[in-house]
Image (cartoon, coloured by chain):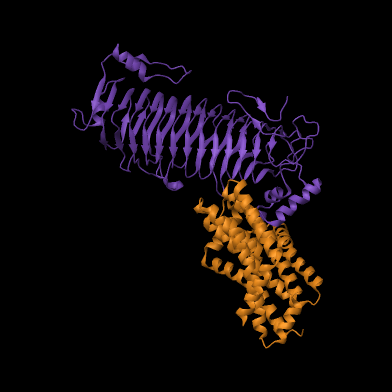
Chain colours: A purple, B orange
Amino acid sequence: MNALLLVLMMVVPPEQEVVEIDLLQTPSAPAALTVCPTCEISSLREALERAPVGATVYVLGGVYRESTLVVRKSLTLIGEDNPVLDGEGKYEILVVDSVNGFRIEGFTFRGSGISFMEDQAALRIRNSKNCIIQNNTFLDNFFAIYLESANTCVVRNNTIRGPGRTENFSGNAIHVWSSYNILIEGNHLSRHRDGIYLEFVRDSKILNNISEDHVRYGMHFMFSDDNEFRGNVFRRCGAGVAVMYSRRTRLSENRFEDNWGGASYGLLLKEIYDSDVEQNVFRRNTVALYVEGSDRMLVRGNVFEKNGWALRVLGNSMGMSFMYNNVLDNTFEASTNASRNYNAYLYNFWSAYVGYDLNRDGYGDVPHRPMTLFTQLVEQYPAAAILLHSPLEYLLQYAERLLPVLLPSAIEDDRPLMGRIVWSKSETSPSDTTALKP
Amino acid sequence: MTWKIMRWVARDVLRSSWIFFYTAFFLALSIAFFTFFEEPSRILLSLLNLVLMVVPLVSLIFSLTYLFNNRNFILLTLTQPVARRSVFWGYWGGIGGPLALSLLVGMGLPMVFYLAGHVSYAPLGALMVAGGILLSQIFLGIALWLAFAFEDRLKALAVGLLVWMALTFFYDGLILTVIILASAYPVEKIAVGLSFLNPLDLVRLLVLMQMDVAALMGFTAAVFKKFLGSAWGTVTAVLALMVWVVFPTFQAAVRFQRKDF
């Protein structure tokens, strides 16, 4: 009974996913081993070898330096009083290979090896399914958690801090390759190369993580369809968040903040199709939202505040709906290299809008063109940015106000809102706006 | 004797309502910015615009009018046994001192109070006040040159305004034209080079490079920073500004020395 309970605990699935419990892998042997430096079993390697399939191994406090440990059977590893697994900067620490049902919690992994030939990780799960990795700490590793063909896994509430070295000398905090049904939730990731890296990952959820101070991207994914990213914070990353070559991605209620630098983006979309970017907050990024070669995007209800560029859309993006966004106080509101507009910009509030609303219906009576002449010049001739905040820039602004014909018309909001849109938390459409009366 | 004339001119300048309004204008705007805006970077950016647009114009026009209004008195002084050199440098310091003082009071003083709470912005504030003072000295030099080159005050004013417009707008237009025409080539270095030749661009970029907005200039900013970061760049920047301060003033001095009033 006890064992069965343990087995059941071990394979607690993430909500709503169906888990196969492979009974053949779970014998009836009572299974609980304890490892500590002064115990009968003082070596974790020995414990892992002796533990029957489905056992629980309790590891008590202490530092374990046992080169690479490989687990090839279903196990639950529980760390008590913070046992430390030390890679001594030389090797991978724990490899889980071809296992159905694995759970690890309460450990500290530190100092995995650095290699330029292979991706050495503190914890690697390979060709496995049904795993839970929670409440662990990862310090100064090359890669921290590496899921490789690992399906239906939960990575929850881990703290992962990297060494903050240069791109070549640091790996990713959570690296997932060719997997599905992954839940990455509530982790705190910092100082790695990329915070979260997904490649060929589908039907997964990335929720409420904090990813900050990474050398390169806060999150980076590609060839990953049907994923949801909600409630995450990505801040102070060298290049922000970059997502590429994916379909049906939902990015909502995330915060992209302080990704500031010569080549930093809040969110960079490259060849992303049929995806939603909703109710995110973009604050103080060099380029808040960069859209390249992405079709049929819905960008709705976001806040763009105090960015260099709020929106940069390249001409090869079509069918984007940019609606109900608050665009506040950005140096450049929007920019494109296209001469024609293939996207819809409607019902946004632009703080730079200077039009009027005579019939008081909440919409400005004249269209708003967020791309100014100077913005266009900088888009076409990047070196022209040297004239930023020069009297000439203000002269150009003044001139286009007098002669609207000067304004580029590639981006135009025909129905700009007169007041800021206020969203209430639970709703998916704007409820109360200071101006909008549907 | 130079010192005596300088003190006398300075006292006269300080009594004029122009300099009073100039100081009050800066004081009022600085206090308003500091009170109504929250972000230091935004306030400093607004003040930078004032420094770039208002300081040169006011310094130029004020100096020109003062010199032409006091033309007779200058002549009278020259009939006395006083060296021409003393008279010139007396006027130079007598006008330049109060101009610098009004910037220090109008912009520096509110900054001291406000930036006490944002110490990290203090060097930037100091750089801006210094830049403002430098610009006012440059345009004082230009005014002195024009005042002793032209007999007609209207002509002098017209040329002065033209110089101001050229440095403020036309020169940037020229840079923009070069950038557009040469856009097929790596034009960043040329643009940075050109910006070193105009004191207004140089002061603006020196200030902006210390701020977050530098990131928006992308590669150009990187080129500028790299050049400025090198020993050569620093020397060139200081030298360029010094040439602008010294050259017009010495031209004026030479003209004054030889002028047949």
Residue placed at 60% from the left, 41% from the top?
A: A288
Q: Does the rendering let one see residue B244?
A: no
Residue B17, above or below A50: below
Rendering quarter of residue B127: bottom right
Q: Position of residue A141 (x, y in %)?
A: 37, 40
Position of residue A272 in the picture relative to residue B76 (left or right) = left
Residue placed at 65% from the left, 83% from the top?
A: B85
Q: Which residue is nearer to you in this view: A325 or B260? A: B260
Q: Position of residue B8 (x, y in %)?
A: 65, 76
Q: Position of residue A300 (x, y in %)?
A: 64, 30
Q: Does the rendering let one see residue B52?
A: yes
Locate the C terminus of chain B by quadrant. Answer: bottom right
Residue B80, above or below A341: below
Q: Which residue is nearer to you in this view: B141 or A86? A: B141
Q: Position of residue B224 (x, y in %)?
A: 58, 60
Locate the N terminus of chain B by quadrant. Answer: bottom right
Position of residue B190 in the picture relative to residue A356 (left or right) = left
Residue placed at 51% from the left, 37% from the top?
A: A234
Residue A184, above or below B151: above
